[in-house]
Image (cartoon, rainbow, N blue to C red):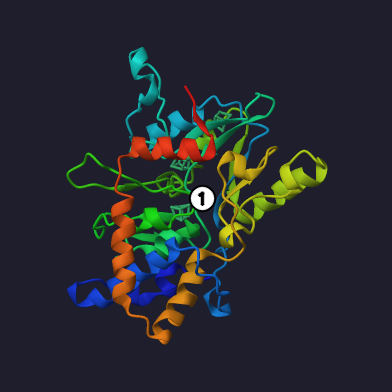
Amino acid sequence: MKSDQEANPKKATVNRRGMFRILGAGAAATVAAVPAAKASVAPDQVRVAPQNAAAMLYDTTLCIGCKACVSACNETNNLPADPGFSKHINNIYNAPPSLNSSTKNIIKLYKNADNTEWSFVKQQCMHCVDPSCVQACPLSSLTKGAHGIVAWNGNQCIGCRCCQLACPFNIPKFEWTAVNPKIVKCEMCKHRLDVGLQPACTEACPRGAVVYGTREQLLAEARKRVAANPGKYFDNRVYGEKEGGGTQVLYLSHVPFTKIGLPELDSEANAAKVRTNTEHIYQGGITPLVIYGALLGVTRHFFKEHVKEAEEEKAKTGLKEQL
Ligand code: SF4
Ligand code: SF4
Ligand code: SF4
């Protein structure tokens, strides 16, 4: 298994002379944001999870919404608590409205209109097997590294937010108020894994609702739970096994995945579609300027404050923040 950097060695070196390469990657980001690109993926563009890929399995049927995982995540990442919607009660809770620049992990609640169906859901980076954010970043600031963990390197980031546009799970967040803003997202606690510990959220969970292991182990565990409990889990299947080319964070849910904010994705990674389609675009002679113009337009459209983004996400998915 090749990492993204190994598979795309040209992306690793960035300087002013690399402008054409940067613009080419910008085009890739745009294509990633345009669902019209439907051509099937070239076999040599398919990526698979590395051996011993670090993974997490979250099971909605075990989660009690206690948010121990949210606090543990803040603590291990030295992120301040975000009082969010508890501001009117003296900021006493860590209650961010959504993932944001000080929240890499959040628990939300899904409830149907008559309160007869509900579920908690944990949201963090999915550590996609073939990540759109990595493909879209024009400066290789996001990389898929050891154990398939997708991490951000600030030294090269220009804050263009292509990664945000490209991510099908709406995960990377931008530090709006910082002078030198970062892209913030879960990096699977790689600082803990490096010293033999498990992620803080899996360690803190009192119910084993989120557990850590290799992707292979956790897929086997998830399939075992499904087989032992026919009808308990939606569609009797594991989300992330195939969706979007596969993810290293896997979900079991008793309600439909879309209701807890997990998008319906086909089994081909957007990033692989982009690599395949970009070749087609250049072969077809379509001028890249059209693509760069579209990129600029889409980027401007998405330059909004995070609270507004959170409200929009809430309206779209129905998922509510947890006090
Ligand atoms: S969930 Fe989004 S941010 Fe995380 S690896 Fe996938 S594309 Fe990147
Ligand atoms: S793996 Fe670490 S950074 Fe990611 S959600 Fe869990 S505690 Fe937070
Ligand atoms: S710590 Fe475990 S049970 Fe509590 S909210 Fe997080 S995943 Fe759910």
Q: Is residue 80 visible?
A: yes
Foreground residue among 173 and 296? 296
Left or right: 182 in relation to 108: left
Residue 130 located left or right of residue 289: right
Q: Return the x and y of residue 216 as percentages of the image width and height.
A: 65, 56
Residue 188 x, y percent position in the rendering: 46, 47
Dot 1 alpha-carbon crowd within 10 angstroms: few under 14, some 14 to 19, many 20 or more: many
Residue that label 1 marks: 126
From the viewer's side, name the closer residue of 245 and 213. Answer: 245
Q: Quadrant of residue 159?
A: bottom left
Q: Residue at x 18, y 73 (%)?
A: 16
**Residue 55, how many percent across, how many down?**
56, 50
Q: Residue at x 20, y 72 (%)?
A: 15
Task: Count numbered badges in the picture.
Answer: 1
Q: Quadrant of residue 293?
A: bottom left
| Horizontal arrangement in the rendering, residue 41 relative to residue 84 (left or right) | right
**Vertical position of residue 145 compared to residue 223: above or below:** below
- Is the CB of mark 1 within 8 Å of ligand 1? yes
Instruction: Give the quadrant of residue 30.
Output: bottom left
**Image x and y of residue 192, in percent:** 43, 44
Secondary structure category for the residue under label 1 = loop
Question: At 41% across and 66% down in the image, what residue appears?
Answer: 135
Q: Is residue 145 visible?
A: no
Q: Amino acid at mark 1?
A: Met
Residue sitting at x 50%, y 69%: 37
